[in-house]
Image (tube, helix red, strand yellow):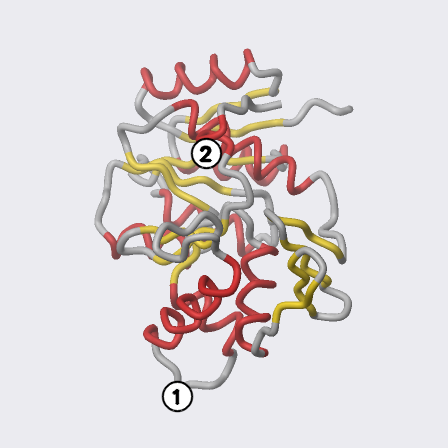
Amino acid sequence: MKQETVLIIEDDPSILFGLRDTFERAGYQVRTAVDGTLGLQLALSIRPNLILLDLMLPGQNGYQLCQSIRAAELDMPIIMITALGQEEQIIRGLNLGADDYMTKPFSIQELMARASRFLQRRRKNLPDLVEFGEFELDRGSKRLRHKNSWVDLTPKEYGLLDYFIRNIGRAVTRNQILTAVWGDDFIVTDRSVDRAITTLRAKIEPNPHRPRFVQTVPQIGYRFEICPPWKEGLTPT
């Protein structure tokens, strides 16, 4: 298998060198940049499999860089690394095309696990049958099976679950969910997402009050996890 490339764009030397060494030890080819201008040049030229992107950079900042990468129709996963924990700043990055975020200081094990999951997902196309827990989602017939019986989903619940399945591990905002699932129906609000999440959880979660699959990302939105690897002791491949 061709060695996968990770591009790290970070201007803090200690963080940059630590991430570079960790990913190289895990078997990835690593390229680095300490400013947004060089980072964009590398992203466009080498087309890495994954980008780790600091938001506060000299030259182009992380927001501009993310927007430029998506404008060039590059679809590799982008994980933002930010010291900014404010809701509006994280949401801005996600809306510009980032797939996930880590707030400094962060766990390197969790970052590696998230990176590994994104890369694994890109290696294969999403099948028609997707299993999670005791459930099997048949994307061809648009039905959900639990053990030997079918689960009755409304069209919006199915659309929501299918959107989550297509974005496993990705932090998504309520606005992104509204656009993807409700489309041009402008009557709905963020509360419509929360209500649909509540009814979906009631049908798929072993304990809806402590959700395993549809996890709340405080102040941001939601993340769908089949098996959070950093909680199960798994290591990146």
Vertical arrangement, residue 10 with respect to residue 25, above or below: below
Q: Nearer the viewer, residue 164 or 33?
A: 164
Residue 188 on image: x %, y %: 39, 83
Instruction: Report which quarter residue 3 is drawn in.
Output: top right
Could you tell which of marks 1 and 2 lies nearer the N-terminus? 2
Q: Nearer the viewer's eye, disc 1 or disc 2? A: 1
The number of numbered badges drawn on the structure is 2
Residue that mark 1 sits on: 187
In the image, what residue type sits under mark 1? Ile
What's the residue at 25%, 57% (across, down)? 88
Task: Sort mark 2 into few (<14), some (14-19) or many (20+) by Cα contacts within 10 Å.
Answer: many
Q: Residue at x 53, y 72 (%)?
A: 157
Q: Which residue is tagged 2? A: 52
Q: Is residue 206 above or below residue 34?
A: below
Quarter of the image where the C terminus is located: top right
Is 72 or 215 nearer to us in this picture?
215
Q: CA distance from mark 1 to mark 2?
A: 37 Å
Q: Amino acid at mark 2?
A: Leu
- Residue 216 locus on image (x, y percent): 36, 53
Q: Is residue 141 left or right of residue 20?
A: right
